[in-house]
Amino acid sequence: MTAFVLATIIGGLFALGTFLVLRRDLLRVVWGLAIISQAANIFLITVGGIVDGTAEAVPVLAGHDGAANTTDPLVQALVLTAIVIGFGMTAFALVLTFRVYDENETMDVTELEEDL
Amino acid sequence: MTELFVVAPMLVALSTAVVTLVARRWPNLQIGASILGVTVYGATIGWLTWRVVLAPDAPGAVAYQVAGHRAPFGITLVADALSAFMLAMAAVVAVAALVFSVSYMDPRDQQISYHPLFHFMLLGITGAFLTGDLFNLFVWFEVMLMASYAFVVFYGGPEHTRAALWYVVLNIVASAVMLLAIGGLYAATGTLNMAHMASRLADPAASGVRVAPVVGLSTLLFAVFALKAGLVPFQFWVPAAYQAAPLPVTAVLAAATKKVGMYAIIRLYFTVFAAAPTVVELPGIAGQSPLAFSGPLLFVMGVASVAIGGFGAVAATSIEEVLAYSSIGQVGFIAIPIAVAATADTPAVQRIAVIAALVYALNHALSKGLLFLSAAAVRDATGTGEFAELGGIAGRMPVVSGVFFVGMLSLVGIPPLAGFFGKFLVFDAALRGESAIALGALLGGAILTIIYTTQTWTQGFWGEPTVAVNDAVMNHSQLAIIVALALVILAAGVWFDSVYQFADAAAAAAIDRTAYIDAVSDGGAWT
């Protein structure tokens, strides 16, 4: 069940992100990029495997003896790195959007392309 | 630590980046530290190459386990002949480009961020060439890209910000795709270490790995590397970004950053994914490994790159635009032999084809680096790179014209320059691969190369000197650097035997995955 919900959410986020990236408004493009990056992050988390939660499977509740039931820590390390990088990229893309508007006085991707 | 030389180039690039960032208030100190840093960087790569490949008792591949965590649990850096070959190529152009930019770039621009960014870009390139971990490769890609974003937008004008926007948007999407592919590969194989992945894929029954998802995910990853390398249909960011970035940086982008994409294709597909036993039986395509899928794909992309890059360069209106489009076409010349290698029937043909790709990559890196730096020297002297405002450079500035001529001859492939052997080997590989389409495409591409280099020469260098050319003043230190780089190209052609042996060792390292796995796992035993 959890796997099905997560798959639907990831698919929905990718669809929404792709839709936004294909808009003419530059700010929506950047929003789309942020959503696509987040969808990739959620996908990374699910890669570690999904097990339905029980009291024994949660390390804090089960005590330290239940270490065998903990989830794969590697994907969490990966996703933390990916989040930090994605955050930096989104910030850079936003600043760049502002500079593009400043220099070209338009936020319309089609108009920007015509000038190129 | 005896393996410290593996990580030394990265440490040097990182410390130089930090020092130049701190020394911003003392411009002379900053420039001095930067030049010293890049020289030491070149020296450490020489040291690495000596220890791994050239020394009499060279082991061929050396692994450095970061922080002492053993593979496959920690991050591993691996220096083998293939990495050393790519690093040596990048280092030659990087040293020349940095020393060149000291006299080319405006002092204020240099002071703000030029030097730290340059060294961070080098760090990213070096990391990507050395890492033996798939996710770590993603991180080094991002380090390299972040610096190159800043370089594309460096001058901050309308066209620069626009070029940077396409570049950034494309690469952020590519990063998300790369994360998807890496995550999927981790789920399918249970490891991120490239050597571990290769040994698990080689014996899927024992390791419980399902091969089918790996084939699909490796193709997803392929799109990312093709974008980095600027292969058609992912080439559209190249001309704008190359013209927007400062020209010495463009030399490094064309010579090293692009090659990171080609390196990743060779390393991951030949060393890692080719290990997976897959029986492929499709109409016209047959083989025993996932290479049977990616080979034809790469072939179509390479042929299209040769055509689009060639025609784009013929239609270009400035020196920089010719060189940028030419980069697309020349990457096609590297991709076609790799595709021939991927679909080759015998190991001998495969090896020859990989050697051809590597030698051509070296030739492209050196000659395109030289041409971009010469274009920068012309722009610095005349203030323009547009053909409409140029003419008669050959009469007024014979040295820079001579150097440009050498670069173009090497691109076309005239002996005794390095380019001749590159072209020769690529044609040889296509002939041995018995691919008529490849030969036709290569021949067409070679003719297009002759057309656009001749056009550039007649429009920019012959004829009556224009006003801009007549008032030009050459910078002598810039001249010295490009002459030195031209001599390197000549030397690579005259002493081609040693270059060939190095490329041969690199190709062997790419194909022979046992040595790679042994180096990383300390004798093939995974803990």
Image (tube, rainbow, N blue to C red):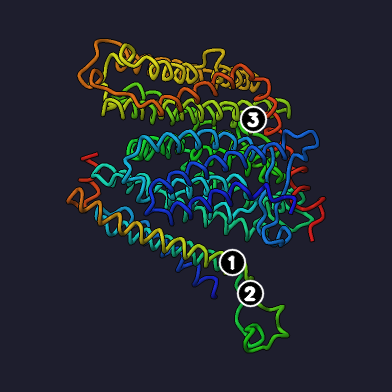
The residue marked by circle 2 belongs to what chain?
A
In the rendered image, which quarter is residue B185 located in? Answer: bottom right
Q: CA distance from mark 2 to mark 3?
A: 42 Å
- Foreground residue among B280 and B138: B138
Figure quadrant of the N terminus of chain B: bottom right
Task: Give the residue type that dot 1 points to.
Answer: Val
Whether residues under marks 1 and 2 lie with C-beta atoms below 8 angstroms apart, the answer is yes
Foreground label between 2 and 3: 3
Q: Secondary structure at mark 2?
A: loop
Q: The residue under label 2 is which amino acid type?
A: Thr
Looking at the picture, does residue B352 appear above or below residue B249? above
**Type of residue at label 3?**
Val
Q: Which residue bears the numbered disc 2? A: A71
Q: Would you call the spot at circle 3 few (<14 residues within 10 Å), some (14-19), or many (20 or more)? A: many
The local secondary structure at tag 1 comes to helix
Residue at (36% x, 35% y) in the render: B104
Q: CA distance from mark 3 to mark 1?
A: 35 Å
Q: Which residue position is annotated with label 3?
A: B354
Residue on which disc 1 sits: A75
Would you identify the image quadrant in which residue B357 lies?
top right
Describe residue B70's horizontal placement relative to residue B46 as left or right: right
